[in-house]
């Protein structure tokens, strides 16, 4: 699923509007969530994000094409089109996430899955691609998100939420499908929109420079029961209530220390470790620096 930059919860007429990224960030660290929501200019994209989004576009174009007429060029055209319009520059070659490695992956994807039985599911609104959905979790919470791709297995008619993930390693990838709040939330959204759906496929795509190796893929199927969805709804309710409490008391507490250091470290570390009365100024400085880097 894409849309990582639209993670700011809002409250209107007593109803919270919140998405999966916001909930994840709040659970990661209240303080990081507050810094992020209050300073949207500090959020930056990355080559990894742009590359992943370009792969998503390629997959959408591929599965929109009729079975039997699909080829790698359909994917490459969509992939290149996204890269050309992206504000983040993806290198042409020499890096794991480059235009060249993207084309190698897409050729290999077609060679591997060219005869699979999936096609884009269509309803009265058209193909189920990049569909923005909302659902009322409770009178006080609207959950929203964008579902990139719902595919239908032409053999048995079963619907699948499809999510393509680029990753530097497929080791442990099979374990990423369950539990996975993001998939559960999107299945909830789809069910709320009237789809008879309980299954998802997490498609792993290994990304390297491919100097001495070939692309590798892994498909993991996941099922969501009504119990799991109810469990997820409790998580949304609890996390939103906790965020409301943080807002009401102006207390944005630090998290367990791992969130400060994983994935290259939290970008707010310097702000967070400064005295409280200096943080607003340091955040402004960070926002200015980010804008200069992006120019
Ligand atoms: S440095 Fe750690 S405690 Fe501070 S905002 Fe970031 S994740 Fe939270």
Image: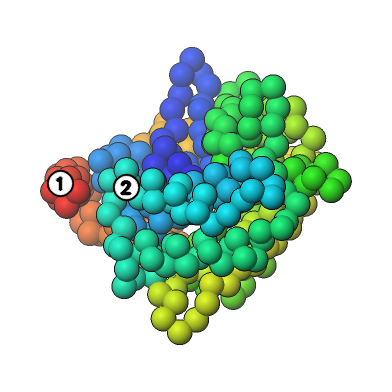
Residue at image point 32% right, 47% down: 84
Looking at the rendered structure, the secondary structure element under dot 2 is helix
Residue at image point 32% right, 43% down: 85
- Percent across and percent down for residue 143 are 58, 31
Alpha-carbon neighbours of circle 1 within 10 Å: few (<14), some, or many (≥20)?
few
Question: Left or right of 131: which side holds 22?
Answer: left
Residue matched to label 1: 295
Quadrant in which residue 165 is drawn? bottom right
Question: Left or right of 11: which side holds 220?
Answer: right
Nearer to us in this view, 48 or 105 = 105
Nearer to us in this view, 282 or 108 = 108
Question: Left or right of 142: which side holds 157?
Answer: right
Beta carbon at label 2 within 8 Å of ligand 1: no
Q: Earlier in the sequence, mark 2 or mark 1?
A: 2
Residue at image point 66% right, 59% down: 114
**Residue 282 is at least partly visible in this image:** no
- Percent across and percent down for residue 112 are 65, 66
Nearer to us in this view, 163 or 29 = 163
**Residue 93 is at least partly visible in this image:** yes
- Percent across and percent down for residue 185 are 64, 41
Q: How many marks?
A: 2
Residue matched to label 2: 84
Among all residues in the image, which is located at the extreme bottom?
212
């Amino acid at each position: 699923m894409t849309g990582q930059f639209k993670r700011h919860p809002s409250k209107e007429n007593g109803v919270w509007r919140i998405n999966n990224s916001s909930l994840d960030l709040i659970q990661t660290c209240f303080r990081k969530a507050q810094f992020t929501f209050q300073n949207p200019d500090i959020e930056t994209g990355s080559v990894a994000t742009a590359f992943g989004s370009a792969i998503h576009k390629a997959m959408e174009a591929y599965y929109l094409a009729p079975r039997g007429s699909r080829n790698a060029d359909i994917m490459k055209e969509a992939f290149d089109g996204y890269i050309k319009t992206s504000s983040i520059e993806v290198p042409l070659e020499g890096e794991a996430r480059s235009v060249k490695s993207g084309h190698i992956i897409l050729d290999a994807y077609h060679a591997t899955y060219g005869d699979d039985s999936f096609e884009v599911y269509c309803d009265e609104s058209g193909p189920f691609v990049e569909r923005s959905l909302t659902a009322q979790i409770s009178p006080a919470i609207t959950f929203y998100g964008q579902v990139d791709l719902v595919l239908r297995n032409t053999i048995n008619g079963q619907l699948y939420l499809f999510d393509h993930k680029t990753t530097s390693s497929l080791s442990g990838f099979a374990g990423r499908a369950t539990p996975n709040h993001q998939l559960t939330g999107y299945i909830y959204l789809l069910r709320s929109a009237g789809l008879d759906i309980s299954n998802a496929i997490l498609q792993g795509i290994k990304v390297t420079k491919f100097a001495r190796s070939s692309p590798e893929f892994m498909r993991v199927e996941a099922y969501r029961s009504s119990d799991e969805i109810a469990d997820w709804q409790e998580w949304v309710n609890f996390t939103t209530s906790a965020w409301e409490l943080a807002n009401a008391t102006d207390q944005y507490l630090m998290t367990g220390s791992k969130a400060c250091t994983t994935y290259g470290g939290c970008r707010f570390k310097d702000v967070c470790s400064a005295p409280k009365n200096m943080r607003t100024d340091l955040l402004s400085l960070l926002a200015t620096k980010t804008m200069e880097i992006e120019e």
